Amino acid sequence: MRAMATLQETNADGPQWAAKWFAFWEPIEIKLWRKSETILFARFKMLVGALLTLLTQMQYIDISPVMPFFPEKWRSILEFLFACLPLTLTLLGMMDERLRWVTTKPVELVAIREEDVPLEVRRAIVEAEAAKKIAVTEVKVAKELGEIPK
């Protein structure tokens, strides 16, 4: 009966157990992927690429059973493309993470031609960019002073 009561106890944000879970998980998210799903997926791609490289080098992945389905003249090309797959995945993951760090505008702002942006929106964009720079500077200073963890 106490377990049911515990599950039913809630605060303004939801069940107490969920608050405890997210309080536990949030520092891990911040440390590993900065709470960005884009960075998480990019790093996952890099991990898969590295894992495929390792498995291929250990000869656990072998494409020879499917090679009879292709003409002999394509064999070397297919083997080369298969060998490049792990590297391609890793590079795509690296590019995705880099793009996440340099592009932070919402899709709604990016998907408009420059000529079609109303003047009010341009002003709001400039104000938002200035506020973002101030906020980033404030966080960096707070980290250097030790007010928030790095």
Image (cartoon, helix red, strand yellow):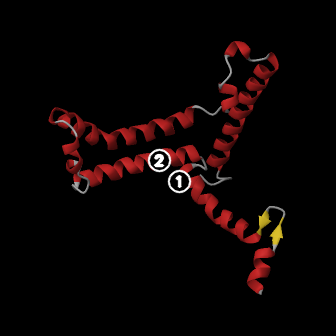
Relative to 120, is 103 above or below? below
Residue for point 24% across, 47% down: 66
Relative to 137, is 41 above or below? below
Residue hosting label 2: 43
Residue for point 18% across, 37% down: 75
Mark in the foreground, 2 or 1? 2
Residue for point 79% across, 64% down: 14
Quadrant in the picture for residue 55? bottom left
Q: Nearer the viewer, residue 121 or 56?
A: 56
Q: Amino acid at mark 2?
A: Arg
Residue hosting label 1: 32
Q: Nearer the viewer, residue 123 or 60?
A: 60
* Real-space Cα separation, disc 2 to disc 1, in angstroms: 10 Å
Residue 137, position as x, y percentages in the image: 67, 37
Residue 109, position as x, y percentages in the image: 69, 27
**Residue at the extreme right:** 12
Residue 1, position as x, y percentages in the image: 77, 87
Category of crowding for the residue at label 2, using alpha-carbon neighbours closer than 10 angstroms: few (below 14), some (14–19), many (at least 20): many
Q: Secondary structure at mark 1?
A: helix
Residue 147, position as x, y percentages in the image: 68, 53
* Pointer 2 with pointer 1, Cβ within 8 A: yes
Question: Is 31 left, or right, of 110 in this rendering?
Answer: left
Question: Is 37 left, or right, of 130 in this rendering?
Answer: left
Category of crowding for the residue at label 1, using alpha-carbon neighbours closer than 10 angstroms: few (below 14), some (14–19), many (at least 20): few
Residue for point 74% across, 25% down: 125
Q: Amino acid at mark 1?
A: Leu
